[in-house]
């Protein structure tokens, strides 16, 4: 472990990074996002080492994946052990034990008390596809309600629900028919005009819109299979809904026999200070999706559904690699570490300290319009002007770039939100050092330097 972090020895991107980026662009699809030219050579705990010898504090956790930090020795050992025993034997067609163990654990920690079963895929999008198919199969209804600002993945079914940036959809239509998007109660910018200091009014207007304008005017609720939502919007800008919203959705769904599908792919696995973000509102979904942190760094996606609705027959849905034994070993080790080290509670407590620090920062910097989050899933929305709340898009990107050049790997979400999503076991000193650097960059950008 280096004496002082972050440590920048060559201004990034250094020569080796530039060379690799050039090579990459000659053979890799240009459709990837790529926030900045960070070329990671290795990673350990909450630190990233680039190919030029720079050391960064990781505030991204490899996009909300590395909950217990990079290359945790126990996860690596579990992967090695499993790799020497069984790499693959299509769980679609045969049986092995470790996927059953992960499924049992998932059922045990999943929200609510109903008996549940698990479907395994390899990614978030595959978990969402499974949820879509099961919703239609079990209800024999065709419509799906999703939210503007949502991100559920990029395969055709999942993409049909995704609505956080036009580029994600441009050129790919027609998408899945029967998907209807409604606004999400983004209280800081309430689509229904409620004032930002009255989030519950925003939630009530959103729910009333769904009932009065959508269900009473053009989408027959008895033909709606599912309402799919993120309990905290991720790519949409780390948007936390008002407290009455998710219980309100549950009520609306129950009134019309609609399934509630909770996408916990980014917010789950302890990140928000509960195993699953929906637990903050005491609601049990009918179907939940998980991926990202679930696989401990290896590809794994899961859909957890009430057993009652998992009646689909053999052959109706499956995938060759879903529930791969090595991914399952990494997953079990990750869940064991999260439990043993109390990382869910740590995310909650540390998240409170981070929110306090960020709210103090907000007092000092007019560019910070809103600070919101739960646990270690926190968004800092930058604005050009607090009155108009005009998004400071360029400025957010500038803060991100400058932070990276100074050794803090952090990215944006939504239009102009800095997202804080480090490993759940990040040492406090690194976390607060990273926040100091982010604040310094906000000052520089605010001062036009
Ligand atoms: C909430 C949510 N759902 C689904 C996905 C898609 O997951 P994947 O990229 O593994 O397909 C993501 C990825 O960012 C996500 O944040």
Image: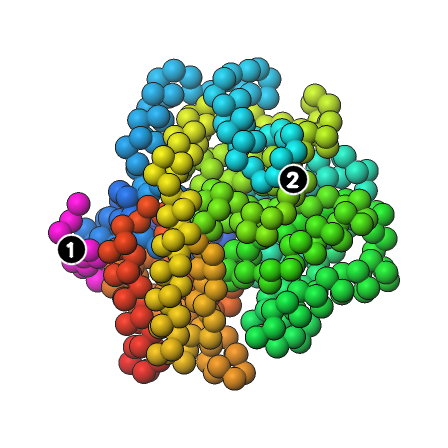
- The answer to which quarter of the image holds residue 166 is bottom right
**Residue occupying the point 32% across, 52% down:** 58
Q: Which mark is residue 4?
A: 1
The answer to whether the beta carbon of the residue marked 2 is less than 8 Å from any atom of ligand 1 is no
Q: Are the residues flagged by discs 1 and 2 in contact, CB closer than 8 Å?
A: no
**Residue occupying the point 56% across, 31% down:** 107
Is there any visible trace of residue 134 in the rendered image?
Answer: yes
Q: Which mark is residue 244?
A: none
**Residue occupying the point 60% across, 30% down:** 118
Residue 262 locus on image (x, y percent) = 62, 46
As drawn, is 118 to the left or to the right of 238?
Answer: right
Q: Which mark is residue 287?
A: 2
Q: CA distance from mark 1 to mark 2?
A: 45 Å
User: Which one is nearer the viewer's eye here, 294 or 94?
Assistant: 294
Callout in the foreground (1, 2) = 2
Residue 416 locus on image (x, y percent) = 47, 69
Q: Which residues are magenta?
A: 1-13
**Mark 2 surroundings within 10 Å by alpha-carbon count, few (fewer than 14), some (14 through 19), many (20 or more):** many
**Residue occupying the point 60% across, 60% down:** 243
Residue 8 locus on image (x, y percent) = 19, 59
**Mark 1 surroundings within 10 Å by alpha-carbon count, few (fewer than 14), some (14 through 19), many (20 or more):** few
User: Which one is nearer the viewer's eye here, 153 or 388?
Assistant: 388
Q: Is residue 169 above or below residue 176?
A: below
């Amino acid at each position: 472990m280096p004496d002082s972090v972050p440590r920048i020895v060559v201004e990034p991107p250094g020569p080796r990074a530039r060379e690799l980026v050039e090579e990459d662009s000659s053979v890799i699809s240009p459709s990837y996002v790529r926030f900045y030219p960070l070329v990671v050579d290795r990673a350990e705990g909450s630190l990233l080492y680039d190919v030029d010898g720079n050391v960064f504090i990781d505030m991204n956790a490899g996009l909300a994946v590395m909950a217990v930090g990079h290359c945790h020795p126990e996860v690596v050992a579990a992967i090695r052990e499993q790799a020497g025993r069984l790499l693959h034997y299509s769980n679609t067609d045969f049986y092995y034990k470790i996927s059953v163990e992960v499924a049992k654990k998932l059922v045990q920690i999943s929200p609510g008390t109903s008996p549940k079963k698990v479907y395994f895929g390899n990614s978030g999008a595959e978990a969402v596809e499974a949820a879509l198919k099961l919703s239609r199969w079990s209800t024999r209804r065709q419509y799906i309600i999703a939210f503007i600002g949502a991100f559920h993945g990029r395969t055709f079914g999942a993409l049909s629900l995704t609505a956080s940036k036009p580029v994600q959809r441009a050129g790919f239509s027609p998408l899945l028919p029967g998907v209807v998007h409604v606004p999400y109660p983004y209280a800081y910018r309430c689509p229904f005009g409620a004032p930002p200091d009255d989030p519950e009014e925003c939630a009530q207007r959103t729910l009333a819109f769904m009932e009065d304008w959508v269900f009473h005017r053009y989408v027959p609720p008895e033909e709606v299979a599912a309402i799919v939502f993120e309990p905290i919007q991720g790519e949409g800008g780390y948007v936390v809904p008002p407290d009455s919203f998710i219980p309100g959705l549950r009520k609306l769904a129950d009134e019309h026999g609609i399934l509630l599908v909770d996408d916990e792919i980014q917010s789950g696995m302890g990140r928000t200070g509960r195993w699953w973000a929906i637990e903050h509102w005491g609601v049990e979904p009918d179907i939940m999706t998980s991926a990202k942190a679930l696989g401990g760094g290896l590809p794994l996606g899961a859909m957890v559904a009430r057993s009652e609705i998992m009646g689909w027959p053999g052959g109706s849905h499956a995938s060759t690699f879903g529930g791969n034994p090595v991914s399952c070993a990494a997953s079990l080790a990750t869940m064991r570490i999260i439990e043993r080290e109390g990382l869910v509670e740590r995310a909650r407590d540390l998240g409170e300290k981070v929110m306090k620090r960020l709210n103090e920062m907000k007092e000092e910097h007019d560019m910070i319009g809103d600070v919101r989050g739960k646990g270690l899933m926190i968004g800092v929305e930058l604005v050009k002007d607090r009155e108009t709340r005009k998004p400071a898009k360029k400025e957010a990107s500038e803060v991100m770039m400058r932070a990276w050049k100074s050794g803090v790997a952090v990215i944006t979400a939504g239009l102009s939100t800095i997202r804080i999503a480090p490993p759940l076991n990040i040492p406090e000193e690194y976390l607060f050092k990273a926040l100091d650097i982010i604040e310094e960059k906000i000052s520089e950008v605010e001062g036009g330097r």
